[in-house]
């Protein structure tokens, strides 16, 4: 996959990625509900009409990644795919308890609590459940699913055949490349990172911040 086939859609502080695949597009993550107009504009300017959107994949169930799934199902009639272990978060709006690793993360948790109403989303039922090792060729996407729990139980990464990893919030690059700021399960996150370290990953596309080379991070892990 050439990098020009990947468009980063910056939605204030969270990323969505539009990937051009054979005969259409895959959208990875969808931003907050309040980002709908910007997201739709970006889809349109890429000529991603409803029949061209083959699949929407969400890397995990957090509301800043799933905010527009219900709208996409309704307006684009597209399928939403995610790991089953996060489905209660999107079907029932279940909120996870998580540890914030840094001061900024702690402050953000407080802001999020204060602005709860602004940060809501329409609940939805996923159409497809993705699991470890699953191949995405049937959607024209030369990539596979990695189940990498830790940030959330159902966090997944999407690894393209040529080493691009869409990592959700398992990694972040707000100021510098690093591992998740919010953690549901430390041990699981550690195991996931150790697994990823052994894989042939070149670029990481995080949920927050700019893409970076795995090498930049590998030295610190
Ligand atoms: Zn998250």
Image (cartoon, rainbow, N blue to C red):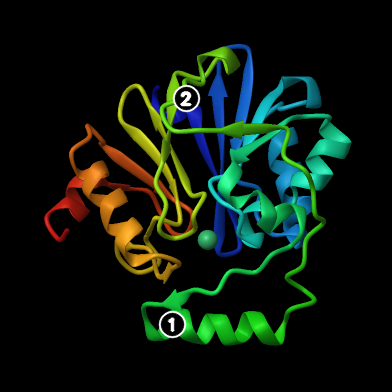
Residue 64 vertical placement versus 146 (above, below):
below
Residue 176 vertical placement versus 53 (above, below):
below
Residue closer to the observer: 119 or 127: 127
Residue 100 vertical placement versus 176 (above, below):
below
Q: How many marks?
A: 2
Q: Residue at x 69, y 59 (%)?
A: 32
Q: Within the image, what quadrant is residue 114 found in? A: bottom right
Task: Report the disc number at residue 201.
Answer: none
Circle 2 sits on which residue? 134
Marks 2 and 1 in Cβ contact (< 8 Å): no
Q: Which type of secondary structure does the marked residue at label 1 adopt?
A: helix
The residue at the far right in this view is 74
Q: Is mark 1 within 8 Å of ligand 1?
A: no
Residue 104 vertical placement versus 130 (above, below):
below
Q: How many neighbours does mark 2 have within 10 angstroms: few (below 14), some (14-19), or many (20 or more)?
A: few
Task: Report the disc number at residue 104.
Answer: 1
Q: Which type of secondary structure does the marked residue at label 2 adopt?
A: loop
Give how far across and how far down residue 212 sits, in percent.
31, 49
Q: Quadrant of the N terminus?
A: top left
Q: Residue at x 51, y 14 (%)?
A: 137
Q: Residue at x 57, y 13 (%)?
A: 138
Q: Earlier in the sequence, mark 2 or mark 1?
A: 1
Q: Residue at x 58, y 69 (%)?
A: 96
Give how far across and how far down residue 10 sits, in percent.
57, 53
Give how far across and how far down residue 42 sits, in percent.
69, 41
Judge left or right: residue 181 versus residue 162.
Answer: right
- Marks 2/1: CA–CA distance: 35 Å
Q: How many neighbours does mark 1 have within 10 angstroms: few (below 14), some (14-19), or many (20 or more)?
A: few
Judge left or right: residue 119 versus residue 131.
Answer: right
Q: Nearer the viewer, mark 2 or mark 1?
A: 2
Q: Quadrant of the C terminus?
A: bottom left
Give how far across and how far down residue 7 sits, in percent.
53, 37
């Amino acid at each position: 996959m050439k990098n020009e086939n990947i468009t980063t859609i910056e939605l204030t502080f969270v990323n969505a990625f539009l990937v051009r695949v054979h005969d259409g597009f895959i959208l990875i993550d969808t931003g907050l509900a309040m980002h709908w107009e910007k997201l739709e504009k970006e889809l349109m300017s890429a000529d991603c009409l409803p029949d061209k959107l083959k699949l929407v994949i969400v890397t995990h169930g957090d509301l800043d990644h799933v905010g527009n799934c219900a709208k996409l199902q309704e307006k684009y009639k597209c399928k939403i795919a995610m790991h089953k272990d996060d489905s209660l978060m999107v079907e029932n709006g279940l909120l996870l308890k998580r540890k914030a690793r840094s001061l900024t993360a702690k402050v953000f948790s407080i802001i999020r609590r204060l602005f709860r109403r602004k940060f809501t989303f329409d609940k939805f039922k996923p159409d497809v459940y993705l699991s470890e090792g699953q191949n995405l060729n049937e959607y024209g996407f030369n990539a596979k699913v990695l189940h990498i729990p830790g940030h959330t139980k159902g966090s997944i990464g999407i690894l393209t055949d040529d080493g691009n990893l869409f990592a959700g919030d398992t990694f972040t690059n707000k100021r510098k490349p690093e591992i998740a700021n919010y953690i549901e399960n430390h041990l699981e996150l550690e195991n996931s990172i150790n697994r990823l370290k052994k894989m042939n990953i070149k670029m990481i596309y995080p949920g927050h911040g700019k893409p970076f080379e795995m090498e930049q991070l590998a030295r610190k892990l």
